[in-house]
Amino acid sequence: MQQLKLAVSGAQILFVAFGAMVLVPLLTGLNPAMALLGAGIGTLLFQLLTKQKVPIFLGSSFAFIAPIIYSVAEWGLPATMFGLFAAGFMYFVFAALVRWRGLAAVNRLLPPVVIGPVIMVIGLSVAAAASSMAMGQADGKQVVDYSLSLLLAGFSFAVTVVVTVFGSKMMKLIPILIGVAAGYVLALALGVVNVQPIIDAPWFKVPDFVTPEVNWQAALFMLPVAIAPAIEHIGGIMAIGKVTGEDYTKDPGLHKTLAGDGLGVCVAGLIGGPPVTTYGEVTGAVMITKNSNPKIMTWAAVFAICMAFFGKFNALLASIPLPVMGGIMILLFGTIASLGLKTLIDAKVDLMQPKNLVIVSSVLTTGLGGMIIKAGSISFAGVGLCAILAILLNWLLPDAKPEN
């Protein structure tokens, strides 16, 4: 009976995480089944490394959406997977730094003035893609009727906003899932959805694995991208600790949780799925249900792995119309950017200080302006470029001297 209760709780956790988890592969062109498989395996490896002490579920990371889209266009999917595999090692670097010098060293290297604008770039760099999807456009072509697209996008957006603002505590944990479901039902009613692929799909299907192709350009491009989600991981571990009353930074230790997350990112890259990160929605579910047993995350991971082999379900995900996703994206990407702004506000970053102003201004311009810096066969762009720039400027520029 105890295991049944844990299994039901695990299913609930997966339900909470599901909407955001499959959204990343649907936006980047990756296989949703691999996102489920990567999340499940990543969570199990995380629990193995942390001795099943932390009630955390790892799901698809939004920080990698824009970099994946750019990398696939530039170097192809297999090379991108190698880049994502390499990005996992950035977590091991932070884990070693925390083990060696403590959390204070990470905070000095990556203060809010560095992290805040980088997170803003992560959200805003794909704003144009969100608008195009909402208008039913892909690769510059109108794939869904314009008026119909605006109706579907607007409806999906409105439902998500209403749930986010007025929904119950439990509903507020799954606004993306509810918004997509509502938009999908309307699209079905309007005849936009092609259900034939769902009918034709087998019930059981082994996901299509992607074999990584060694490409050091893609690896160097992806490495700095991992900085923001690694910092997000630290915040996630502290947040779940506040909910459960445990200090997970000491036991099992922040270096172990970072290494566990990094291992999950590496595995996701090896199999062809999006990188994983700690999910705040799951922390919210733990807070509401008051069930912080880490074993429920094991069940959630097992269910995610099982769903990866459910052929018809993955065909259903692939049939979600472009405008429905676009309506959700308009809200989601703006939310990510708002979190970056909140990071600056919470830390009371003074933009009247020349150093802070230079860092924030430079990061936003290079990150959103499409700047690419090439050194021989190596190129840096987007989130990776602006993350490196922010770290260098913070290191090189002097702090403001206190006035007498």
Image (cartoon, grey):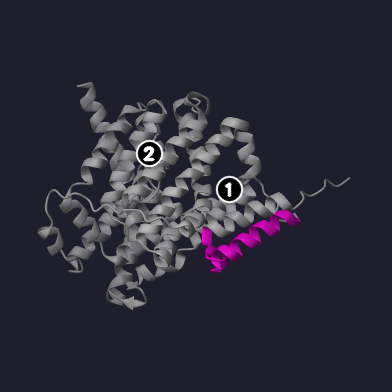
- In magenta, the rendered stretch is 354-383
Question: In the picture, which quadrant includes the C terminus?
Answer: top right
Residue 373 shown in magenta: yes
Q: x, y (%) of residue 32?
A: 28, 53
- The residue sitting at 25% across, 36% down in the picture is 302
Relative height, residue 148 to residue 198 (above, below): below
Q: Secondary structure at mark 1?
A: helix
Q: x, y (%) of residue 366?
A: 59, 65
Left or right: residue 379 compared with residue 176: right
Q: Would you name the residue on which mark 2 appears?
A: 282
Q: Looking at this rendering, what residue extends furthest in the top direction?
A: 2
Disc 2 to disc 1, C-alpha distance: 21 Å
Residue type at numbered disc 1: Thr
Quadrant in which residue 88 is drawn: top left
Q: x, y (%) of residue 149?
A: 30, 71
User: Do we see residue 235 in this rendering?
Assistant: no
User: Do we see residue 348 in this rendering?
Assistant: yes
Left or right: residue 320 compared with residue 291: left
Quadrant in which residue 192 is drawn: bottom left
Near-viewer residue (318 or 179): 318
Residue type at numbered disc 2: Val
Question: In the picture, which quadrant includes the N terminus?
Answer: top left
Relative height, residue 93 to residue 144 (above, below): above
- The residue sitting at 23% across, 24% down in the picture is 3
Q: Would you name the residue on which mark 1 appears?
A: 343
Q: Secondary structure at mark 2?
A: helix
Residue 93 shown in magenta: no
Pointer 1 local density, CA inside 10 Å: few below 14, some 14–19, many at least 20: many
Mark before the other along the chain sequence, 2 or 1: 2
Pointer 2 local density, CA inside 10 Å: few below 14, some 14–19, many at least 20: many
Near-viewer residue (80 or 25): 80
Left or right: residue 285 compared with residue 383: left
